[in-house]
Every structure is written in structure tokens, then in C-alpha cells.
Image (cartoon, rainbow, N blue to C red):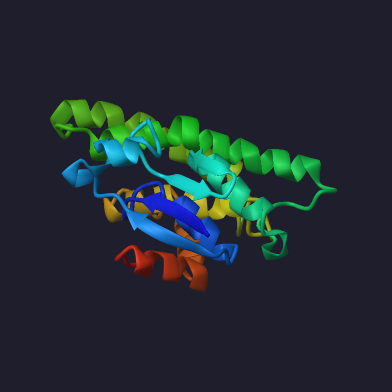
Amino acid sequence: MLKLYYSPGACALASHIALEEAHADYELVRIDLSKGEQKTPEYLAVNPAGVTPALVSDDGVLTENLAIMWYAAATHPDAGLLPPDDAPFELARMLRVNGFLASALHPAIGKVLFARPPLEGEARAQALEPALAKYDIVEHHLLKGPWVLGERYTVADGYLSVFSRWLRLADLLDPDRFPKLNAHLTLVQSRPCVQKALHMEGLHPA
């Protein structure tokens, strides 16, 4: 059985959603970041980077959402979470979005929302606008609608929803500035598998 190490509401939610949408057989292991459990010797033996997510499989350990989401989808093809094999450009588009979310958007908004000590005043304002500019790129260039790739749900949708959810919870997902992102988040959160993943983490739709 697969074992997913996660922290509630953190970016590991994307991997959790992917496993649930894949109808995979898995168990959850909660890592409490506020208590520093990600830095314990036991967890560092699983993921030396000391972050979540981490997925333990019969073949070994995978870290990073991009790898875990792809693995969940590829090993459960009947769930249809990836573009078909005969659509390499669509797969490349999905990977482009996931890469942008991981390398550009996540670090930018993470700095605003989760910096320790928290950013305040001018420092926060200076970090916020570049982060929101990353969301503008998704809104206007990467999110086709209604799903990321158009009519087909993929693991990119669950991944994007994590970051849109953070922004909505912070009251920063302005419906006038981000109408497509707001509609997309609401649509993703209407999916039963997403609702189940949120419930399992003690969370609610934003």
C-alpha cells in the first residue's frame, strides 16, 4: 500500500487529491509542521529535505508534488488524470503549468503567506504584488477553462486549486481580477474526491 506523508492544507494536498482522484489504495501519515515533525530523524529518514509531501511505495520513496501526482496518475490510468498517449502536446502543456506552479508561483505566494517571522507593512506589500502577478499569468495565459487544459480534468487542476485556495483563504483571490481562477477553484472543490481529501485533512472548501 502507498503511504503519503502530508501536512494539512499545505502543498501536499495536491498529491493527496491526486491519489484520491486515482482511487489509489493508500494511507496517510500526518506531519505537524508547527511542531517541527518534519525535522525529526524518523521523517528525515523518509525525506532528507524535511518537507512534505513524501510518498512511500513498493519501489521506493518519491518526493515533490510533480513526481507524486504523475506517479499516481500513471499507475492508475483508468482514472484518466493525464492527457492520452496520443496527445503529447497536451501532456507538455500540463507539465508546463505544473512546472510554473512549482517553480514560480509557489515560492512567490509562500513567501507572502508563510514567512517566519511574518512579513508586515512595506515588506509584505513588496512581496505581494509580484506574487499576484504570477496568478495573473495563470489567469490570462495558462488556465484555459473550465479546467486547466480545457474540457479534461488532470492532476494540474488539483495542484492549481491548492494555491488558489490559499489566496481565497487570505481574502486575496479578487473575483474581479481573477474570475477564471475563482470559477476554477469552486469547480475543483465541487468534486467528490477533492471534498473527501479536504475532509480527511480536517479542512473545508474555501
Of all residues, the one furthest to the right in this rendering is 86
- Examine the image and state in which quarter residue 128 appears: top left
Residue 142 spot, x, y in % from top left: 59, 42
Residue drawn 54% across the image and 42% down it: 60
On screen, residue 38 above or below 202: above
Q: In this rendering, would 190 be left or right of 175?
A: right
Q: Nearer the viewer, residue 177 or 122?
A: 122
Residue drawn 37% across the image and 36% down it: 45
Residue 73 spot, x, y in % from top left: 64, 54
Q: Nearer the viewer, residue 153 or 51?
A: 51
Q: In this rendering, would 74 be left or right of 1?
A: right
On screen, residue 97 above or below 15: above
Q: In this rendering, would 2 be left or right of 172?
A: right
Q: Is residue 135 visible?
A: yes
Residue 200 spot, x, y in % from top left: 36, 67
Residue 79 spot, x, y in % from top left: 67, 64
Residue drawn 16% across the image and 35% down it: 118
Total labels drawn = 0
Q: In this rendering, would 48 be left or right of 98?
A: left
